[in-house]
Amino acid sequence: LEPDERDPVRATSRGLGELICAALEAGASALVVALGGSATVDGGAGLREVLPELRVPVVAATDVRNPLLGPRGAARAFGPQKGATPAQVEELERRLRAMTELAGVADVPGAGSAGGLGAAFAALGAELVRGIDLVLREVGFEAALAGADLAVTGEGEVDRSSAEGKVPAGVAAACARASVPCVVFGGRVEGGSIADLYELGVTAVLALSGRPERAREDLAELGESLGRRLSGCGF
């Protein structure tokens, strides 16, 4: 969505519920649902309108470990990213808090992902897992680290949520276990996020220009910088 199209107060997760229903009607016997980057903060209310129960095993892969409510919750931590004003953030927080059917799963790690869809899936009986752990396992990342001198990972914007179970956090943890240096780069880097990543074992956090039209040049310059650091034992 373009910034002027975002409407987190009215946006609904019903479409995801309809997609899952269509997959079930097509014969799916199990599902993996990736949660992250949603435009909604409805606690999965729209989804639950059309999907009151799960008839097959479902794994919900989350990109953060945040709870449903509070300062790190779906509304207050992520509402502003979706276009919510301060007043709307508090309205969304009140709505989520009023969903008593989610109370028992509000503190499950990942409950606050995708506008509270994590909590909705947990309440329906799905298994919540860290998405990055699932992806790294499927691609054989730890085996690929064997003999590596350096791992490089990144995000469009490195912020406090990057250490909350997103790709940089998962890659850094795997690298720490393998004693391989890990460098994180971002189109933009929020200053307060760097310390959190260093605590996970990241070797360096590098900022690019933040300009999409310079992506090719940014990556070329990043490669040159990493080469110089490696050749000079800069890590």
Image: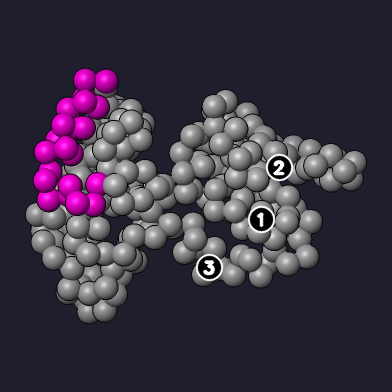
* Residue wearing tag 1: 175
Q: Circle 1: is it few (<14), some (14-19), or many (20+) Cα within 10 Å?
A: many
Magenta segment includes 158: no
Mark 2 surroundings: few (<14), some (14-19) or many (≥20) residues within 10 A: some
Please identify the dominant SS of the magenta region: helix
Identify the element where label 3 is drawn: helix
Tell me, yes or no, whether the highlighted magenta stretch contains residue 87.
yes
Tell whether 4 sits left or right of 135: left
Residue 115 is at least partly visible in this image:
no
Residue 198 located left or right of residue 155: right
Question: Which amino acid type corresponds to the residue marked 3 in the rendered image?
Answer: Arg
Task: Please determine whether, in this image, residue 87 is positioned above or below residue 19.
Answer: above
Looking at the image, which residue is at 23% across and 70% down?
Answer: 23
Q: Give the residue drawn at x 51%, y 70%.
A: 138
Q: CA distance from mark 1 to mark 3?
A: 14 Å
Of the residues shown, which amino acid type is indicated by label 1? Cys
Direction from residue 16 to residue 202 in the image, left or right: right
**Residue 155 locus on image (x, y percent):** 54, 42
Q: CA distance from mark 1 to mark 2?
A: 10 Å
Residue segment shown in magenta = 86-106
Mark 1–mark 2 CB contact (< 8 Å)? no
Residue 172 lies, with reference to residue 59, above or below; the image says above
Helix, strand or loop at mark 2:
loop
Instruction: Report the Cα–Cα distance between label 3 and label 2.
Output: 23 Å
**Which of the two labelled residues, at mark 1 and mark 3, occupies the earlier sequence position?**
3
First of labels 1, 2 by sequence position: 1
Query: Which residue is at a point 24% across and 27% down the rendered structure image?
Result: 89
Residue designated by label 3: 137
Front position in the image: 46 or 177:
177
